[in-house]
Image (cartoon, coloured by chain):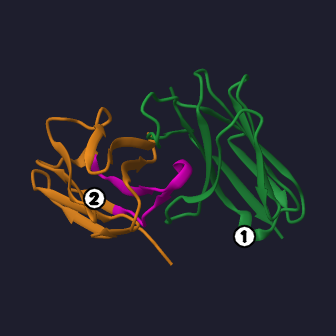
Chain colours: A green, B orange
């Protein structure tokens, strides 16, 4: 089941904040966040493995609420380089351990204007 | 700087022809994933391997697609015969520690 991302698109001024949400109807083992620029491959941002886990680097952070099967990506004081499409990828619990294939949301288009 | 490599980067072919895409995962990674991206369907998982063994290929059309991993440094995805609806960007991703997946640059396939 494909996770649902919201909003579908966001337009911001440089320096503004944004929140992108990802929710699933199924139990999740982990949530992965990627950014993709036009014509390029998705670039790994972070993975959240535990319920309630929060991670971040620079001005991008994320949280994972395992009970609600939701994750949010927070972009603070956005920069022009943050423009792109953000995807969440969800991973099911597996019995064998190790990485499982991801099911991706449809993406959130983020445009940062100067 | 360890990266996933994919060849060819672009491929234009005619309907009915065989297409082979290759991926070299990051050295030391034991999991390889194949994804396909289209405007309509987005990013979809086709198949993946762990320690060269296929674990899941339920996302692949079985009659025309096949994926193999002949050795730890090479994964292949083959389409035979190709159809226009196969036109897409095919990504290989290399699975590292703690479940991280790093994408290769992709193969842009156009089937006429």
Residue identifier under label 1: A81
Q: CA distance from mark 1 to mark 2?
A: 30 Å
The foreground one among B23 and B52 is B52
Q: Residue at x 36, y 64 (%)?
A: B25
Q: Residue at x 62, y 27 (%)?
A: A24
Mark 2 chain: B
Look at the picture and state if A25 lies above or below B44: above
- Write down the region rendered in magenta: B86-107
Q: Same chain for the residues at labels 1 and 2, yes or no?
A: no
Residue identifier under label 2: B110
Quarter location, residue A45:
bottom right
Can residue B40 be seen here? no
Quarter location, residue B94:
bottom left
Q: Is residue B50 left or right of residue A58?
A: left
Confirm whether the magenta stretch covers residue B97.
Answer: yes
Q: Quadrant of the C terminus of chain B?
A: bottom left
Residue B61 location (% of width, % of height): 23, 36
Residue B27 location (% of width, % of height): 39, 68
């Amino acid at each position: 089941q494909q996770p649902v991302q919201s909003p579908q698109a966001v337009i911001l001024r440089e320096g503004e904040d944004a929140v992108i949400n990802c929710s699933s109807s199924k139990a999740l083992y982990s949530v992965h966040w990627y950014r993709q620029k036009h014509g390029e491959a998705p670039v790994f941002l972070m993975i959240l493995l535990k319920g309630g886990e929060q991670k971040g680097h620079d001005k991008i952070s994320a949280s994972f609420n395992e009970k609600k099967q939701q994750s949010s990506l927070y972009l603070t004081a956005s920069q022009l380089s943050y423009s792109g499409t953000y995807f969440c990828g969800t991973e099911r619990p597996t019995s064998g351990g190790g990485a499982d294939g991801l099911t991706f949301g449809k993406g959130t288009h983020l445009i940062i204007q100067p | 700087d360890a990266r996933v490599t994919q060849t060819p980067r672009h491929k234009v072919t005619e309907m009915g022809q065989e297409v082979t895409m290759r991926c070299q995962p990051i050295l030391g990674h034991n999991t390889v994933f194949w994804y396909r991206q289209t405007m309509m369907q987005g990013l979809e998982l086709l198949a993946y391997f762990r320690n060269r063994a296929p674990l899941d290929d339920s996302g692949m059309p079985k009659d025309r697609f096949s994926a193999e991993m002949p050795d730890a440094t090479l994964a292949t995805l083959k389409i035979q015969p190709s159809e226009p609806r196969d036109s897409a960007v095919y990504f290989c991703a290399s699975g590292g520690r703690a479940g991280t997946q790093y994408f290769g640059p992709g193969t842009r396939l156009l089937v006429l």
